[in-house]
Amino acid sequence: MFRPSYDPELFFHWHEVQTRFRDLDPLNHTNNAVFNTYFEEARIHFTYSIPELVESLNQGFAFVLVKSTIEYLKPITYPSILLIGSGILELGNTSVVAMQALFEANTKQLHSIAEVKGVWYNSKTRRPAKIPEVDNLDKLLVNIDN
């Protein structure tokens, strides 16, 4: 999986999270299960930053997570402020593959990366649905070729 260096231009959306004491495991590191919560929170904020998706969410649509791959590169300690970048790698008719990277805010060190796949879902029909057209879609994409 691509391991990016910190670059504020790499991701369309950035979300800040503070670690909590309750996130720690017996080794005084953030528990690996909590990384998923950090990534999830950032994805929710990313989704709500796109007006076309918000409008569709309000009509009963949502993303359903179908796959998540997380690489744990460095432990996260408490207290820490984290920066999570989110963007789109691939966009299909009903699915999205997103890339996320979690950095420590002060040092800009990369601690974890995630690649997730979600399906746009119609909660009324309980079936996948076409993802709404998004203006300026290109700005949401992660360019990992550089």
Image (cartoon, rainbow, N blue to C red):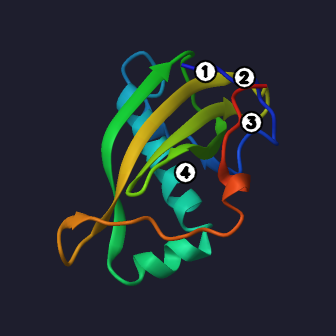
Q: Earlier in the sequence, mark 1 or mark 3?
A: 1
The residue pinned by badge 1 equals 2
State how far apart marks 3 and 2 are (Cα): 8 Å
State how far apart marks 1 and 4 are (Cα): 19 Å
**Residue occupying the point 67% across, 23% down:** 110
Q: Earlier in the sequence, mark 3 or mark 4?
A: 4
- The label nearer to you, 2 versus 1, is 1
- The secondary element bearing badge 4 is classed as helix
- Foreground residue among 71 and 2: 2
Which residue reaches farthest front? 93
**Residue occupying the point 76% across, 38% down:** 10
- Vertical comparison of 129 with 33: above or below: below
The residue pinned by badge 3 equals 105
Q: Position of residue 28 (x, y in %)?
A: 47, 21
- The secondary element bearing badge 1 is classed as loop
Q: Earlier in the sequence, mark 2 or mark 1?
A: 1
Residue 109's label in the rendered image is 2
Task: Give the amino acid at mark 3.
Answer: Ala
Q: Position of residue 128 (x, y in %)?
A: 27, 61
Q: Earlier in the sequence, mark 4 or mark 2?
A: 4
* Residue 31 in sight here: no
- The secondary element bearing badge 2 is classed as loop
Q: Which of the image's four quarters has the N terminus? A: top right
State how far apart marks 2 and 1 are (Cα): 15 Å
The residue pinned by badge 4 equals 42
Structural crowding at the residue carrying mark 3, measured as other residues with C-alpha within 10 Å and reported as few (<14), some (14–19) or many (≥20): some
Task: Give the amino acid at mark 1.
Answer: Phe
Q: Are marks 1 and 4 in contact (CB under 8 Å)?
A: no
- The secondary element bearing badge 3 is classed as loop
